[in-house]
């Protein structure tokens, strides 16, 4: 049997529309909406029951994403970088839920790195999606911990190999 029946419904009788959420308010072209679309399609094809899913996120543009899919699921928006700890608590409280975490590069690789490492160590069954664009979008493009070394932007901080930022008015390449 294929994931999608001929009548536009999946194996549990839901349509793709049943997996959508609110209309996106994210900037066009940032990529987060494409990820949301993929999550919707994957959940539809897998026949996930929305009420058996817990969506978890932190703070930032990526963390707005869970509002845009699986509107009939459980959701929790955690403090910046703390989504992995919330996921651990949800798992301990209700092991029947499918956990889906959406996090950004700052949430995961900066303030939340320690939380993320402990999540991995605990082996919590969580689908953890990192929406990595190399910048903190809500602060208008400040480079994140995952920005490539040598990334340049006129009059903005430049990423260095030590994770520190420096002003680069002359647009010299960081060695």
Image (spheres, rainbow, N blue to C red):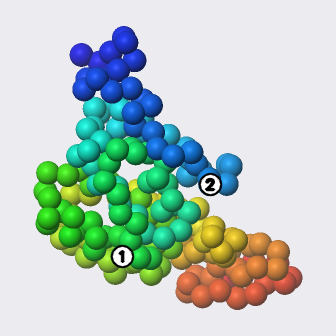
Which residue is the site of mark 2? 26
Relative height, residue 58 to residue 62 (above, below): below
Residue 39, position as x, y percentages in the image: 42, 43
Q: Do the residues labelled 2 and 1 touch (CB within 8 Å)?
A: no
User: Which residue, given by chain and number where applicable, does mark 1 sit on?
Assistant: 82
Q: In this view, does 99 lie above or below 174?
A: above
**For the residue labelled by badge 1, is the local secondary structure a helix, a strand or a loop?**
loop
Residue projecting furthest to the top: 6
> How far across and how far down the image is residue 171, in percent?
82, 78
Q: Can residue 140 be seen in this view?
A: yes
Residue 50 vs residue 144, the one in the foreground: 50
Q: In the depicted view, which residue is nearer to us: 95 or 129?
A: 95
Query: How far separated are the C-alphas under marks 2 and 1?
Result: 22 Å
Q: Nearer the viewer, residue 104 or 72?
A: 72
Residue drawn at x 58%, y 48% as measured from the top left:
24
User: For residue 15, which numbered disc appears in the image?
Assistant: none
Residue, x 66% and y 75% (percent of image)? 139
The structure residue drawn at horizontal position 24% and vertical position 16%, both measured from the top left corner, is: 1
């Amino acid at each position: 049997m294929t994931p999608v029946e001929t009548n536009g419904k999946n194996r549990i009788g839901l349509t793709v529309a049943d997996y959508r959420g609110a209309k996106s308010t994210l900037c066009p072209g940032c990529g987060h909406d494409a990820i949301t679309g993929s999550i919707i399609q994957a959940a539809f094809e897998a026949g996930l029951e929305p009420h058996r899913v817990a969506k978890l996120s932190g703070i930032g543009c990526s963390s707005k994403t869970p509002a845009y899919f699986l509107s009939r699921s459980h959701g929790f928006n955690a403090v910046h970088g703390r989504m992995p700890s919330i996921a651990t608590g949800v798992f301990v409280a209700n092991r029947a839920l499918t956990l889906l975490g959406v996090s950004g590069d700052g949430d995961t690789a900066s303030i939340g790195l320690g939380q993320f490492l402990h999540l991995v160590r605990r082996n919590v069954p969580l689908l953890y999606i990192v929406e990595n664009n190399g910048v903190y979008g809500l602060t208008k493009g400040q480079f994140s911990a995952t920005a490539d070394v040598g990334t340049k932007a006129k009059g903005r901080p430049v990423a260095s190999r030590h994770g520190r930022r420096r002003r680069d008015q002359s647009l010299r390449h960081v060695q």
